[in-house]
Image: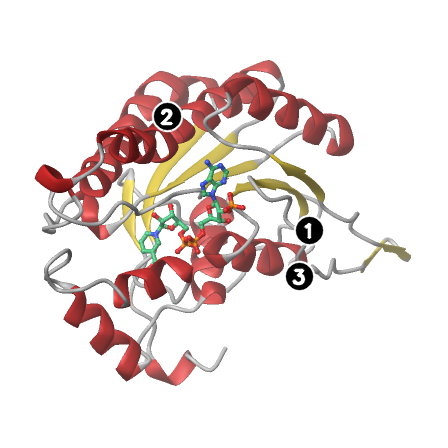
Amino acid sequence: MTPDVFGRVAVVTGASRGLGAGMAVHFAAAGMHLGLCARHRPNLVVNTRPTARDGHVISAEPPFRAAVDVTDHQALSEFTDAVVERFGRIDLWVNNAGVLEPIGPLSQADPRAVARNIEVNVVGVLNGSSLFARHVRSRPGGGVLINISSGAATKPLAGWAHYCAAKAAVDQLTRVVTLEEAPHGLAAYSVSPGVVDTDMQAMIRHTDAEAFPEGARFRQIAADGSFNSRAWVAEHLLAIAFGTKRPTDVTVRIPDQPASSRAR
Ligand SMILES: NC(=O)c1ccc[n+]([C@@H]2O[C@H](COP(=O)([O-])OP(=O)(O)OC[C@H]3O[C@@H](n4cnc5c(N)ncnc54)[C@H](OP(=O)(O)O)[C@@H]3O)[C@@H](O)[C@H]2O)c1
């Protein structure tokens, strides 16, 4: 199912843990070159796959990693330049960095925490989208932008006003980027990964019902073990970006993983 992506270059933001770290491991195993960032420099061990081409064994290079806050446009711009300098170009950019907190009724929320949530989830994605779009315009060939959204973009959930608003904004900004950049070769998608067991999910499970009434549904998913694995999500992202059939809609929901393949 995985398309041939050997030697392609991907950037993943928020790659120090969770879904972003899972993507990095999977993309590296498929032979991609990687630029990885988060506020904490991603230090995960990723195995790059050597392959034989024309009788020569070629090893993918180790990832370029940096401590970057996606809300800092200048720092993200310098990171972009460093990745291009190392690998020559970027083919796929995944704006994955995101935060859920603060959880609870908007009327009770610290306004600075709400503003910070919007800054990371929306301004961070705008920063990454604009830098990647500029890069794609600057060199020949196309590129694929994937912004990680959520079911919360379309489903209102009490306790998540800012997160729901932020992810709805991610869907809409991705539609606008498509309008602006498709003529320059950029395909953009806003992808909802389904429920994946990460620190963010642990936080959801441990939030009391007063702050987040829907918590029981997520605790049930954990009890059933019916998450989407990181590998499942990463595989679908590669199929979206490099598969033979690109999605026709800008917003994409990764399907629920069948129980039979969850051991992976
Ligand atoms: N897990 C799910 O079920 C689920 C469902 C739907 C959507 N999502 C979305 O998937 C994405 C990843 O979520 P996750 O579950 O993997 O969350 P997570 O476990 O909390 O990881 C979040 C990642 O984002 C990074 N990050 C946070 N703020 C950042 C900033 N300002 N600049 C750079 N990096 C930052 C974190 O690293 P540092 O702390 O080192 O910065 C970490 O690597 C998010 O966009 C989330 O909204 C997740």
Does residue 70 appear left or right of residue 154 in this picture? Answer: right
User: Which one is nearer the viewer's eye here, 33 or 241?
Assistant: 33
Which residue carries the number 3 mark?
29
**Amino acid carrying mark 3 in the image:** Ala
Residue at (42% x, 49% y) in the render: 240
Q: Could you say where residue 229 lies in the image, as x and y percent from the top left?
A: 43, 69
User: Distance between the Cα atoms at labels 2 and 3?
Assistant: 31 Å
Which residue carries the number 1 mark?
6
Which residue carries the number 2 mark?
123
Mark toward the start of the polypeptide (2 vs 3): 3
User: Distance between the Cα atoms at labels 2 and 1?
Assistant: 31 Å
What secondary structure is found at the residue carrying circle 3? helix
What secondary structure is found at the residue carrying circle 1? loop
Q: Which class describes the residues within 10 Å of circle 1: few (<14), some (14-19), or many (20+)?
A: many
User: Distance between the Cα atoms at labels 1 and 3?
Assistant: 9 Å
**Amino acid carrying mark 2 in the image:** Val
Note whether 179 is above or below 204 in the view shown.
Answer: above
Q: Is mark 3 within 8 Å of ligand 1?
A: no
Residue at (19% x, 42% y) in the render: 164
Note whether 167 is above or below 43 in the view shown.
Answer: above
